[in-house]
Image (tube, rainbow, N blue to C red):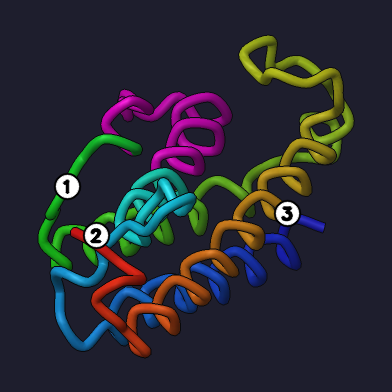
Amino acid sequence: MTISMNNLYQRDLDKLANEISLYENEEDIWKLSGEIKNSAGNLALHLVGNLQHFIGAIMDNTDYVRDRENEFNARNTPREKLLSEIETTKMVIGHVLPILTEEVLSNATLDKIPFDMTNEQFLLHLYGHFGYHLGQINYHRRLVAGFHPTLLTS
């Protein structure tokens, strides 16, 4: 199970890096529009923060300290910094998932997890959450590519 989950997370973290890299103009990563309250940059920060917190800090006791408020409030973090955080997250995931035992996966010992589920279920939950936001980033990028001044603002 953990090998498959690791492969999926690695694949989709690569997709996230690709999406961020595909923005022609770096400033477009941070554009907002009407009801679209989260830019691709903020969603990317949220995804890596979420995974580094729950899988790294909670499941493996890394020294990562999450700043969830900053994930949604930061503006204009350089693309290279975003890509670096994605790469760091890949390394954390690649280290932690392969060492999780069946016993750890079947337990619900992580009292810092906000849901009543086993660790394995929570890893699946995190993966679904990741996919949801990855889709939003893809849509945001394509919307920005067809930019019309009345559609998006900085």
Frontmost residue, 101 versus 48: 48
Can you identify the residue that label 1 sits on? 75
Q: Residues within 10 Å of mark 3 (few under 14, many from 20)?
A: few
Q: Which mark is residue 128?
A: 3
Report the magenta residues as a range.
49-71
The quadrant of the image that shows the N terminus is bottom right
Q: Main secondary structure of the magenta part?
A: helix
The quadrant of the image that shows the C terminus is bottom left
Q: Residue at x 54, y 64 (%)?
A: 136
Element type at mark 2: helix
Element type at mark 3: helix
**Residue 24: x, y in percent?**
21, 88
Can you identify the residue that label 2 sits on? 30
Element type at mark 1: loop
Disc 2/disc 1 C-alpha distance (Å): 7 Å
Q: Amino acid at mark 2?
A: Trp
**Residue 35: x, y in percent?**
48, 50
Q: Quick check: marks 3 and 2 in contact, CB under 8 Å?
A: no
Q: Amino acid at mark 3?
A: Gly
Q: Quick check: marks 2 and 1 in contact, CB under 8 Å?
A: yes
Disc 3/disc 1 C-alpha distance (Å): 26 Å
Q: Amino acid at mark 1?
A: Arg
Q: Residue at x 50, y 58 (%)?
A: 94
**Residue 85: x, y in percent?**
27, 55
The relative height of residue 57 versus residue 152 in the rendered view (above or below) is: above
Q: Quadrant of residue 144?
A: bottom left
Q: Quadrant of residue 126?
A: top right
Q: Residue at x 63, y 46 (%)?
A: 99
